[in-house]
Image (cartoon, grey):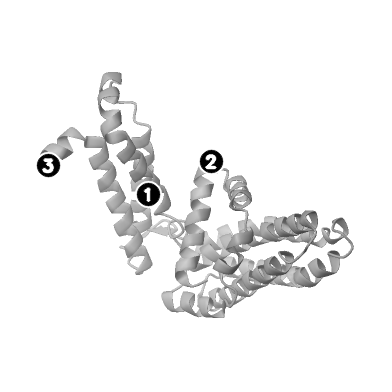
Amino acid sequence: MNPISNIWNHPRTSIAGLLIAVVTVAGVFSQQGVTLGTAGTGTIVSLIAAAATALLGLLARDPGELASQRVSRSVESGSKLNAWLLIALLLPLPWMEGCSGTSVAQDIVNWTPALQSAVATVDSTAALLAPADAPVFLAATTGFDAASNLLVTQAKAYLANPGANTLAQLQAQVITFEQQVNAALLAAAKIVNPTSQQHALSVIQAVGTIVSAILALVQSVSSKAAVAQMAAQATIKLSAVGPYLDRAQSARMVAGHYGEPLGQARMQVAMAEKNESAAGF
C-alpha cells in the first residue's frame, strides 16, 4: 500500500505508531544514559516519553471522529490501534518510573510502609497454620524482619543521598531480601496441608510483590554491569518460584499502591516480571 495514502486513510493509527516510536527511542536513550539535559527533577528524554505516552492516552479516547467515521473504520483500524496502545502502556515500565535517582528513591521509600505491614502480617501468620506447618513457615521467614528493616533504612539513605555508594548498598540489600523471599516461597510450597500452604504462600508473596517492585525501581537506575552483578547473586531464579505466584494478588497490590486501574497494574506486573527474567533474576 502507498505509505502516503495509508497515513491519510488511517491517521489515528499512524499517529499512534509515531508516538510509540518516540516512546521506544526514548526508552533506548534512557537505558544508554542519554538524557539531552534536565527538566525539573527528571530529564528531557523522560519528559518527551511522558508527553508521548500522555498523547497516546488522549488518542485512545479521542471523541473527534464522527459516529459514521467510527463505524466505517472500527473494524479496519480499531484492533490495530488498541494493540499498539497496549504496547505503548507496556513500553514505559520500568524506566519511565525511574526518570531520576531522586524520584526513584522517593518511590522506593513510598513502598516501605506497605513492606513493613506485609512483614508484620507474616509475623502473625504462624499461629493461623496447622501445628505441623508452623515450624516450617517460621524457619522460612525468620529473617524477614531484619531484612525489611535494613531495606527501609537503606531506601531512606538513598533518598537522602542518591549517590553511587548508597545505591550500591540498596542493590545488595534488595537482592538479598529477594532471595530470602524466593527461598521462603519454595519452602512454603512444600507444606502439605492445602489451607496452610495457600495462607503461607499468600502472605509471603505479599512481601515478595513489594520487594519485586523495589527491585524493578532499583534496576531502572542501575548500570548494566550492576544489574548483571545483582543477577549473578540471585541463585534462586524467578522461574523457580513462578508456579507459586498469584499474579492477580500482585496486580491488586500495585493498583492499590499507585491508585491506578487494575488492568494497567496487571500489565505492569507482567512487564516487570519479564524484565527481571530477561536480566537474569
Report which residue position mark 3 lands on: 1
Q: Could you say which disc has been placed on residue 261 in the image?
A: 2
Residue 9 in percent (x, y) is at 17, 33
* Position of 227 relative to 85 (above/below): below
* Position of 8 relative to 29 (above/below): above
- From this viewpoint, which residue is outermost toward the front? 192
Residue 166 in percent (x, y) is at 57, 75
The amino acid on which the numbered mark 2 sits, given as a three-letter code, is: Pro
Task: Locate the N terminus by quadrant.
Answer: top left
Q: Secondary structure at mark 2?
A: loop
Report which residue position mark 1 lands on: 87
Q: Are marks 1 and 2 in contact (CB under 8 Å)?
A: no
Q: Which corner quadrant of the image does residue 176 belong to?
A: bottom right
Mark whose residue sits in front, 2 or 3: 3
Q: Nearer the viewer, residue 111 or 278?
A: 278
Q: Are marks 2 and 3 in contact (CB under 8 Å)?
A: no
Q: Is residue 24 left or right of residue 10?
A: right
Report the number of discs. Answer: 3
- Mark nearer the N terminus (1 vs 3): 3
The amino acid on which the numbered mark 3 sits, given as a three-letter code, is: Met
Residue 258 in percent (x, y) is at 57, 47
